[in-house]
Amino acid sequence: MFQYNSRHKVITGIALLVWAVWHFLVRPPAAERYPNGQVKSSGGQVDNLNQGLWTWYHENGRKRMEGRFDRGKREGLWLLFSPNGDTLHKAWYSADCLNGPSTDYGPGNVVLRTVIYKNDRAVDSLPAGR
């Protein structure tokens, strides 16, 4: 029959340990969803920091916000959208700080306001329509 210290117990123990480590430490978290089943956001992580392109969605499935992360910090162009898909805001980031133009849009993509930022501080503004 089986011996008390048989090899299958060791193999089973190792398999359970590998599964537990993957399940609790490595596996990406399940996507958050709205009550209607629509995904709230999508994107990747490296070392528990947001990495690469991230997209957030309205409950109707259209994009709410989109931008890139580099080791958890916002980088490059970030966009904010209305539930009907119109662009509401564009901003440029570098190392998680506003750097460059930050523009608010009205209906029909009309520019309402543009403010120029450097290291998260407003340094200039442009008239509407430019």
Image: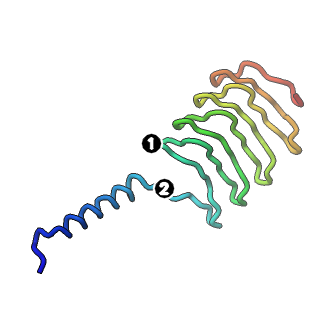
Residue type, numbered disc 1: Asp
**Quadrant the C terminus occupies:** top right
Q: Is residue 91 above or below residue 42?
A: above
In this picture, residue 35 sits left or right of residue 14: right
Mark 1 and mark 2 lie on one chain; the one further toward the N terminus is 2
Q: Which residue is mark 1?
A: 47
Residue 9: where, in percent of width, then height?
Answer: 19, 68
Dot 2: element: loop
Q: How is the image coloured?
A: rainbow
The circle on residue 29 is 2
Dot 1: element: loop
Q: Is residue 96 above or below residue 6?
A: above
Mark 2 crowdedness (10 Å alpha carbons): few <14, some 14-19, many ≥20:
few
- Residue furthest out toward the bottom: 1
In this picture, residue 25 sits left or right of residue 118: left
Residue lying at 11% horizontally and 81% vertically, measured from the top left: 1
Mark 1 crowdedness (10 Å alpha carbons): few <14, some 14-19, many ≥20:
few
